[in-house]
Every structure is written in C-alpha cells, then in structure tokens.
C-alpha cells in the first residue's frame, strides 16, 4: 500500500477526537460470510434486489424465508475476524460509541462481547442500520423474536398472526428512523469517518461519510479496491480489513 496514504491514515487516526466507522460486507468477507454475489448454486439464479424486497416476501414468502434460513446456517460457521476485533478494541479504548454497520451478520456484536470480556461492551456495540439476520420481526405488530429454524408452515406471530420475517431492512423498506438519526448525528459530530469494506452504493448508509466531510471532517477508506468514495477520502488504504485494521488502529 502506498506509503503516503498509510502515514496520513495513521496520523488522522491518532489525531482524531471523534471517530465514526462505517462498515460493509467487505469487513466480513474474511470471516467467510457469503455476500449476495457468493450465494451458493441454489441462489445463483436470483438477484439480491429480487429476493431482499418486500414485494418478493409478499409474492413468495417461502423462497425468501428459505434464502434467509440458508444465510443464517452459513453464518453459524462464521466468526469475527481480526478486522472486527481491532475495531472493537479501538472503540472500547476510546470509551465512546461510533461503530455503524450495514451488515446484518451480527459479527461486530460478537467481536465487542469477546473483546470486552467482563467489562462493558457498550462502546463497541454497532449501530445496525439494516438490522440483524439472527432475529425475526413480526410483519404485523413489529414484535421481535429470536430466529427459529424454518418449519413446513410459514412462521406466524403468536400475538397477531402476522408473518415472522428476518429483522432486516429489505431494499425498498425504510430504515428505523431513530437508528438512522443516531448514525447521522454521530457522522456530523465526527472529525474522522473510517469507511471499511463497503462499495458505498447503498443509501441512505452511503451518505453518512459525506456528512462527516461536510462537517469539516476527514474520510479514511479501507478497501481492497477503489469505490465511489475513494476520491473524497483524505487517505485511501488499499488492503484487506483483517490485515489493515489491527495495524491502523492498535
Ligand atoms: C430506503 C439487509 C426509502 C438485507 C441491506 C437514494 C436514497 C434513498 C434510497 C435509495 C437511493 N437510491 C437507491 C435507493 C434504494 C436503495 C438502494 O440504496 N439501492 C442501491 C442498490 C442503489 N435503498 C434502500 O432501499 C434502503 N431503503 O432507502 O427506503 C424509503 C423511505 C420511506 C418509505 C419506504 C422506503 C434500504 C437499503 C437497505 C438494504 N438492505 N441489507 C440483507 O442483507 O438481506 S443492504 C445490503 O447491501 C447488505 O447490508 C450489504 O451491506 C449491502 C451491500 O453493500 P456493501 O456492504 O457495500 O457490500 P458490497 O458487497 O456492495 O461491497 C463490499 C465492499 O467490500 C467492496 O467495495 C469490496 O471491494 C470490499 N471488500 C471485499 N473484501 C474486502 C473488502 N474490503 C476490505 N477487506 C476485504 N477483505
Ligand atoms: Zn405480530
């Protein structure tokens, strides 16, 4: 990786007073979490935007719920990687929350609990913009449940009979307003936004680093390739999150 970018990134991390980190599917790639494009043969014939939508859920709930059940089973074998853990240690040391993720795999939460040990994991717990695939939510009354294996009948809410679906934000569904407001507030107050493993094409998440920039802060990007944000970054570190983050943050 280019020396100047690396030195600038290290300086910005060292000097930053308020840091927000926005992560995407790339930080979980080294944990073996299948992204949409890696889907097993079974799902190759579907496009994610076709499956992860409320229309698909209404039209063919069984196929959509089977896809999520497949992703949950694939996730069961995955563990937080060195990148998740370095980020958790960083926010635990700083003692203030700042981790925002687009991922629904729950790996940041597991890394926070593992790294915190008996101390409070709170500063390293992520704001999950798009929810978490390990939980269900009732489409009718919003009640949340731990995810259960998919049976022959579609899962129904005991309280209102509504369909129990994964507690994730599908394409075309709004993000939880409070969650988004909190993430925007952190982005506007930050003087450094670390953008890690995201192609920055999914909105409104992708607008968060720009909020830091507009407030006079800097962007440091960690990615294996260029993205639409690379030119807006004060430093763009080219490399895998699992290798770069421990060196950049520890
Ligand atoms: C909404 C949960 C409105 C589901 C997900 C403008 C404004 C507002 C909305 C839109 C807009 N333009 C378009 C929209 C609609 C849409 C959208 O953004 N579409 C995109 C495709 C253009 N947005 C929405 O629908 C959002 N809702 O705006 O609602 C509304 C308001 C009122 C009423 C009704 C509606 C909801 C978006 C949430 C979608 N749900 N996830 C599920 O996962 O099953 S997003 C989903 O995509 C995942 O969460 C994942 O995070 C994300 C993919 O993005 P990335 O994380 O960036 O992952 P990607 O694979 O693209 O990139 C990986 C990167 O990592 C790459 O750059 C790669 O180089 C890098 N990498 C790989 N390996 C490594 C690495 N980097 C470092 N180390 C490595 N080892
Ligand atoms: Zn219900």
Image (tube, grey):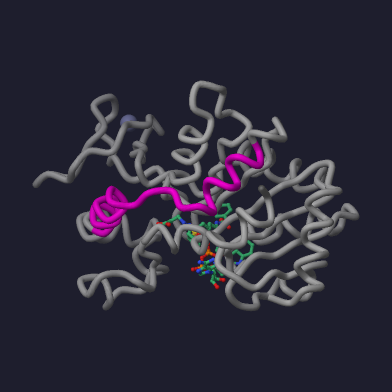
Q: Residue at x 64, y 53 (%)?
A: 22
The reply, left or right, for residue 40 in relation to residue 208 is left
Residue 96's x, y, as percent?
71, 32
Q: Residue at x 22, y 75 (%)?
A: 41
Question: Extreme right residue here?
Answer: 216
Residue 79's x, y, as percent?
38, 49
Point out the quarter of the image occupied by ligand 2: top left
Residue toward you, 66 or 25: 25
Residue 249's x, y, as percent?
68, 50
Does 119 appear in magenta? no
Image quadrant where one finds the N terminus: bottom right
Q: Residue at x 12, y 44 (%)?
A: 151
Residue toward you, 28 or 167: 28
Magenta region: 67-91
Residue 176's x, y, as percent?
56, 41
Question: Extreme left residue here?
Answer: 152
Residue toward you, 116 or 205: 116
Residue 203 visible here: no
């Amino acid at each position: 990786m280019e020396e100047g970018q690396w030195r600038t990134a290290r300086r910005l991390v060292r000097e930053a007073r308020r840091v927000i980190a926005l992560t995407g599917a790339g930080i979980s790639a080294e944990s073996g979490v299948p992204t949409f494009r890696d889907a097993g043969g079974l799902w190759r014939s579907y496009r994610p935007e076709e499956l992860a939508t409320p229309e698909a859920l209404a039209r063919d709930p069984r196929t959509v719920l089977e896809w999520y059940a497949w992703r949950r089973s694939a996730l069961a074998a995955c563990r937080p990687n060195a990148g998740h853990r370095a980020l958790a240690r960083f926010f635990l040391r700083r003692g203030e929350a700042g981790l925002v993720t687009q991922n629904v795999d729950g790996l940041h939460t597991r890394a926070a609990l593992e790294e915190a040990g008996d101390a409070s994991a709170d500063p390293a717990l992520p704001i999950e913009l798009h929810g978490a695939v390990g939980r269900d939510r009732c489409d009718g009354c919003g009640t949340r449940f731990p995810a259960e294996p998919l049976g022959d009948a579609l899962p129904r809410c005991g309280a209102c009979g509504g369909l129990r679906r994964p507690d994730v934000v599908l394409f075309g569904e709004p993000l939880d307003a409070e969650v988004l407001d909190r993430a925007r507030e952190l982005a506007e107050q930050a003087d450094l936004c670390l953008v890690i493993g995201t192609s920055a094409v999914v909105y409104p998440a992708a607008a968060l680093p720009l909020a830091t920039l507009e407030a006079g802060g800097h962007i440091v990007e960690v990615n294996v390739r260029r993205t639409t944000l690379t030119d807006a970054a004060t430093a763009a570190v080219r490399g895998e999150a699992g290798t770069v983050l421990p060196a950049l943050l520890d």
